[in-house]
Image (cartoon, rainbow, N blue to C red):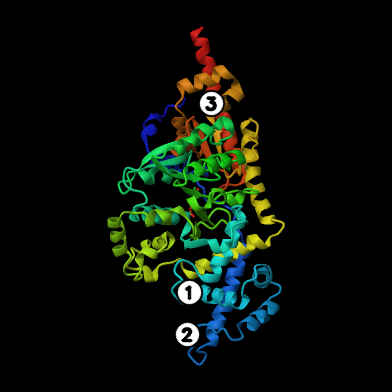
């Protein structure tokens, strides 16, 4: 095919591959690059952002009520006296503005539905959005934590857990959560160099790469999801977790890239394994959980074993905001592991955290994460910026107050229609799976070749064409960037497309490019066949 030699690309790492693919796709000025390699959504929730900006204007005015004898531009801390009634006036005066209407309803929801102190909530929001104090408590603002707990418990399918049994740490997105967790697990000797950890694959590349870093040197055991089972983990793979030498199981659920949630059978098997292995640590990254209907996180199945990571980046289209949380139960096994460390290790850790309290042994892991996030010594300035926490709360309330789930249905249908457009143009059936959230799709190259032109052609393609080279050729000739599934630990040749990042017609164009390429390869295959005869 073509005259360009694409074989040099097959040895690159996933991130180098991505850069090279983009370079090729942008190498021609006469066409647009279609980068379906990015997980960044191109949709976003507007109403909670409007609410944020309106609240900001109200709060700036509140600040100017203090120190109002001073020159313009200098304000003081907002005052709590009369705040509620001034806010009500603001709502009344701006009834025509959707962000303000939302704020009015949010106050009522927090008071009437969640049973929280509305005055204290409003003050926390007004002070928070002005960002005029260090975040206190550093782990998370008080009422904000209560609201986000409610949101996380609902969305992760954990309604039954009492909110008092849970702690949250508000962080700068899911990736910060991962960095803080890995670091604190190591600092607190819960995971040490050379330990074995299991990874649910295919998985977001950093999860494969971080454990291998020099800092961690962990041995990875792959728990492979099976494409023949619509990307569920086969029982035999999950049962590997019964091996007591495996310390922890890291997974993304719903997965990235297959984009499916673990089904009820899988959840039941994991529950059974944890019964046999009460010491198994689970780290679940559930950033895509909010895209599913009736999602059940492993945090709901084995809460005390599980560190939950949730990010607001994808669902609210808020990657630039950097918003996420880490959740742990108060009874978690990690704190028990710290309590069971050797005297020598405990002494070392007591020293590490001695600047924070006179009783360092009593510090919970989640608070150690907060301290570790600022190298312990700078703990007094730890925490997520308060305006970020305010936006996080407004996002969560927006979702909770939407009783018909109109926003969820809208984002679900956006990605599903893109999925359908791609496969329709490609000429193969749109994959249907009730457990799929369709944020990404993996195009199986062999099966596609088989469906389009038969078994013999599919065998020929597998023998004669390198799948990574195919992706380079697509980038070069059409400007379409798809990432090889292999970078995420996918076993068979596949192309991974994010369904969140482009518009529907562009997904149709991607389907068309793939279909053209297959047609061309088929011509080549037929010619070779004739030569042989
Ligand atoms: C996109 C993504 C995230 C989000 O990370 P942020 O830092 O919150 O933007 C986390 N985990 C996975 C698996 C993702 O795909």
Please name which of the two marks, 3 or 1, marks the residue nearer to the observer.
1
Q: Position of residue 315 (x, y in %)?
A: 58, 54
Q: Position of residue 472 (x, y in %)?
A: 45, 34
Estimate the spatial distance between the alpha carbons at disc 3 and disc 1, rounded to whole Å.
Answer: 54 Å
Looking at the image, tell me whether mark 2 or mark 1 is earlier in sequence order: 2
Which dot marks residue 131? 1
201 relative to 102, above or below: above
Please name which of the two marks, 2 or 1, marks the residue nearer to the observer.
1
Secondary structure of residue under mark 3: helix
What residue sits 50% from the left and 14% below the top?
Answer: 528
Residue linked to disc 3 = 446
Looking at the image, tell me whether mark 3 or mark 2 is earlier in sequence order: 2
Residue 93 is left or right of residue 329, and the answer is: right
78 relative to 213, above or below: below
In this view of the protein, can residue 489 be seen by the observer? no
Residue linked to disc 2 = 74
């Amino acid at each position: 095919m073509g005259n360009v030699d694409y074989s040099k690309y097959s040895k690159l790492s996933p991130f180098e591959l991505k850069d090279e693919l983009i370079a090729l796709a942008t190498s021609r000025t006469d066409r647009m690059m279609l980068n379906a390699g990015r997980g960044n959504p191109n949709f976003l929730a507007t109403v909670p952002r409007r609410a944020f900006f309106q609240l900001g204007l109200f709060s700036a005015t509140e600040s100017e009520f203090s120190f109002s004898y001073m020159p313009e531009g200098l304000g003081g801390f907002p005052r709590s006296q009369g705040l509620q009634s001034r806010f009500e006036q603001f709502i009344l005066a701006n009834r025509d503005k959707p962000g303000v209407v939302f704020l009015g309803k949010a106050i009522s929801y927090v008071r009437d539905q969640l049973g929280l102190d509305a005055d204290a909530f409003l003050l926390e929001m007004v002070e928070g959005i002005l960002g005029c104090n260090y975040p206190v408590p550093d782990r998370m603002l008080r009422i904000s934590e209560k609201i986000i707990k409610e949101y996380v418990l609902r969305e992760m399918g954990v309604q039954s857990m009492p909110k008092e049994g849970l702690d949250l740490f508000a962080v700068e997105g899911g990736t910060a959560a991962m960095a803080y967790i890995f670091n604190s697990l190591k600092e607190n000797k819960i995971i040490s160099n050379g330990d074995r950890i299991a990874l649910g694959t295919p998985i977001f590349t950093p999860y494969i790469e971080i454990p291998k870093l020099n800092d961690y040197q962990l041995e990875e055991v792959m728990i492979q999801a099976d494409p023949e089972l619509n990307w569920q983990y086969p029982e035999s793979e999950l049962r590997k977790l019964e091996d007591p030498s495996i310390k922890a199981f890291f997974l993304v659920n719903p997965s990235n890239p297959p984009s499916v949630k673990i089904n009820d059978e899988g959840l039941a098997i994991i529950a059974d394994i944890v019964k046999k292995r009460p010491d198994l640590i689970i780290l679940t990254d559930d950033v895509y959980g909010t895209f599913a209907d009736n999602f059940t996180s492993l945090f709901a199945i084995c809460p005390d074993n599980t560190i939950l990571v949730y990010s607001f980046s994808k669902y609210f289209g808020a990657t630039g905001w950097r918003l996420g949380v880490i959740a742990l139960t108060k009874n978690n096994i990690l704190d028990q592991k710290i309590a069971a460390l050797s005297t020598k290790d405990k002494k070392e850790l007591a020293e590490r955290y001695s600047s924070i309290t006179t009783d360092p042994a009593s510090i919970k892991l989640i608070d150690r994460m907060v301290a570790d996030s600022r190298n312990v010594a700078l703990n007094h300035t730890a925490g997520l910026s308060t305006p970020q926490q305010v936006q996080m709360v407004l996002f969560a309330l927006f979702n909770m107050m939407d009783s018909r789930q109109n926003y969820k249905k809208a984002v679900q249908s956006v990605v599903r229609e893109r999925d359908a457009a791609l496969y329709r143009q490609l000429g193969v059936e749109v994959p249907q799976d009730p457990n799929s959230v369709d944020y990404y799709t993996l195009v199986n190259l062999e099966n596609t070749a088989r469906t389009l032109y038969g078994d013999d052609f599919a065998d020929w393609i597998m023998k004669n064409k390198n799948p990574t080279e195919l992706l380079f050729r697509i980038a070069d000739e059409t400007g379409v960037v798809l990432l090889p599934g292999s970078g995420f630990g996918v076993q068979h040749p596949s192309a991974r497309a994010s369904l969140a990042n482009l518009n529907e017609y562009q997904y149709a164009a991607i389907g068309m490019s793939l279909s053209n390429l297959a047609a061309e390869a088929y011509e080549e295959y037929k010619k070779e066949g004739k030569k042989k005869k």
